[in-house]
Image (tube, rainbow, N blue to C red):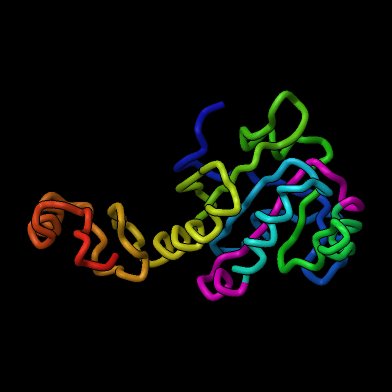
Amino acid sequence: MTSLVGRKAPDFTSAAVMPDGDIEEALNLYRYLDGHYGILFFYPLNFTFVCPSEILAYNNRADALAALDTKLISVSVDSQYSHYAWRNTPVGEGGLGPVKFPMVADITKQIARDYGVLIDDSVALRATFLIDRWAATPMKRCASSRHCASMKNMAMSVRRDGGKATPGCRRPERASRSISPSTMKRSKYFHERGGSSIPSHREPL
């Protein structure tokens, strides 16, 4: 499949368990995002050992992401009823507990297929897509719980930098250190940084 990076995010309509615990039979991605940024993440299956750590890590950052105008959505090949059951089982009993974002059911596996993350026509790989206001996908990466914080930083960078380029090793809150897409401004950026975008051990990111 052709990479989705920089392309329109495939739209979908599917059943989902919503943050209030209700089942929405026809959640549409574009309508739900409604001009907001989005983090769409896939995981293999409910009631597994590793997946809860990633999902709960995202849930712990849901409020911070909402403050960045970013909505979270999870997808797996489970049914909405499996999502509902897992969500209503306490964490201490192998469940997930209430989460603050929709859990989308992909029992036909078409969503995972459209995003290129379906493996062996079985389950979705763990993968995360950052979707901008225009429903394009600037970035895709494999995901694990340790990436959840960096995804928040990526969302912050995309939101604040607009058409600028984000250099490596830069905290997203330092928007003044973005690189404008012009030769003159790029040269000025590197000149001010001593010829490198990599900070020294004396300079915080």
Q: Is residue 65 visible?
A: yes
Rendered image quadrant of residue 85: bottom right
Q: Which residues are magenta?
A: 63-82
Q: Quadrant of the N terminus?
A: top right
Residue lying furthest top in this view?
Answer: 120
Is 164 magenta? The answer is: no
Is 43 placed above or below 23 here? above
Tally the numbered discs: 0
- Residue at point 28%, 54% (across, down): 167
Question: Relative to the observer, which residue lies in front, 90 or 160?
Answer: 90
Is 80 magenta? The answer is: yes
Answer with left or right where residue 24 lies relative to residue 140. right
Q: Quadrant of the C terminus?
A: bottom left
Residue 105 x %, y %: 81, 48
Question: Relative to the observer, which residue lies in front, 13 or 204?
Answer: 204
- Residue at point 84%, 40% (across, down): 107
Residue 70 x %, y %: 56, 66
- Residue at point 86%, 65% (across, down): 90
Answer with left or right where residue 108 lies relative to residue 42. right
Is 24 placed above or below 119 here? below
Answer with left or right where residue 180 lies relative to residue 107. left
Answer with left or right where residue 44 lies relative to residue 85. left
Q: Is residue 133 visible?
A: no
- Residue at point 56%, 69% (across, down): 65
Question: Relative to the observer, which residue lies in front, 146 or 100?
Answer: 146
Residue 159 x %, y %: 43, 64
Residue 87 x %, y %: 84, 61
